Image (cartoon, rainbow, N blue to C red):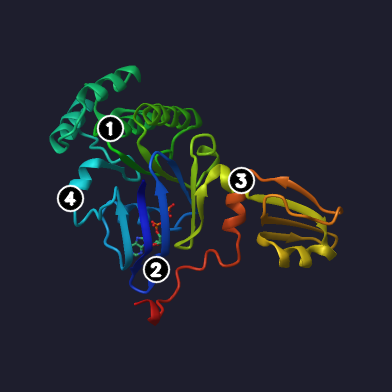
Amino acid sequence: MTVLTATGLGKRYRRSWALRDCTLAVPAGRVVALVGPNGAGKTTLLHLAVGLLTPTAGTVEVLGATVDRDRRTLARIAFLAQGKPLYDGFSVAEMLTFGRRMNPGWDQELAVTRLGELGIPLDRKVGKLSGGQQAQVALTVALAKRPELLLLDEPLANLDPLARHEVMRGLMAAVAETGMTVVLSSHVVSDLENTCDWLVVLNGGRVQVSGDIEELLTAHRLLTGPAELADGVAGRLTTVDDKRTDRQATLLVRADAPALDPRWTARPVGLEELVLAYLRRPDAATLPRPMLASTR
Ligand code: ATP
């Protein structure tokens, strides 16, 4: 089953496209890394998915429905917006009461148990908690909704490495227990490396690559060889990244076991290398761009 489907999805602000021609299909049960630099369109994609924005072009469906047409879908998804959206003047307990009133499927026991395990006092004002604790409260509120799809916009921003690790650990424990689908955005690939199994790279409002992380890593190779042979290889294989000096060429190509002249070496790529290669592609980062008449 596909949990998040975007087809030709686009969002335009005045003359600039924040997201353009976005076509994606994320299967159920995946933990998706939505990565890209600042301004890539990550927040825009998430807001379109949860119905906070309406598309300028195309469609987006979550759990088989368009959120703005079928409000019941909202009860099955949770969205944690950027910057830990909590009320500083509320106590943690009041935050939970708020969550319970807003969400019919609210699991108070889950929330209280989780916060107890984390040692976060229910009577403490949210504004008085550390950044890591606030992130955990926000995540707890999202999890207590018992969503089938959880979308998190930069949940690790401004956290120290230990807090980042703790938040990811809590999230992964919840995924293991419930099998829910998670989409989390970040511009730090290393935060997501060991936890995500699906990758979506956005840049300049466009999807650069999307797919199962294992399959993507298996399907790419980093080739190193003599610069004078590089044009031939680059012309024959799908080249994602091409770096050359006078003597040597380093090509990141889409091919699992390319047949090559013995002067080339081929090695597997890591996730960060793969993401950077797609971000460096010449057609990447071309937005904001003027609106094109044909896309209206
Ligand atoms: P970040 O990592 O900084 O949060 P992002 O990948 O989430 O970035 P978006 O916030 O989706 O990126 O923004 C994509 C583009 O759309 C940017 O160029 C941004 O300036 C533009 N944009 C976003 N919201 C608006 C708005 N309300 N009005 C005009 N332009 C906007």
- Of marks 3 and 4, which one's residue comes earlier in the chain? 4
> Along the line of sight, which residue is nearer the eye, 15 or 184?
184
Q: Position of residue 110 (x, y in %)?
A: 26, 23
Using the numbered discs, state the Cα–Cα distance from disc 1 to disc 3 in whole angstroms: 42 Å
Secondary structure of residue under mark 2: strand
Secondary structure of residue under mark 3: helix
Q: Position of residue 80 (x, y in %)?
A: 31, 42
Q: Are marks 1 and 4 in contact (CB under 8 Å)?
A: no
Can you tell which of label 1 and label 3 is closer to the viewer?
A: 3
Q: What residue is disc 2 on? A: 17
Tell whether circle 2 marks a residue whose Cβ is less than 8 angstroms from ligand 1: yes
Q: Are marks 4 and 2 in contact (CB under 8 Å)?
A: no
Look at the picture and state if 148 lies above or below 60: above
The amino acid beneath tag 1 is: Gly
Look at the picture and state if 122 lies above or below 16: above
The amino acid beneath tag 3 is: Leu
Side (left or right) of 36 relative to 265:
left
Side (left or right) of 109 relative to 248:
left
Q: Position of residue 154 (x, y in %)?
A: 41, 44
> Along the line of sight, which residue is nearer the eye, 44 or 31?
31
Label 1, residues with CA under 10 Å away: few <14, some 14-19, many ≥20: some
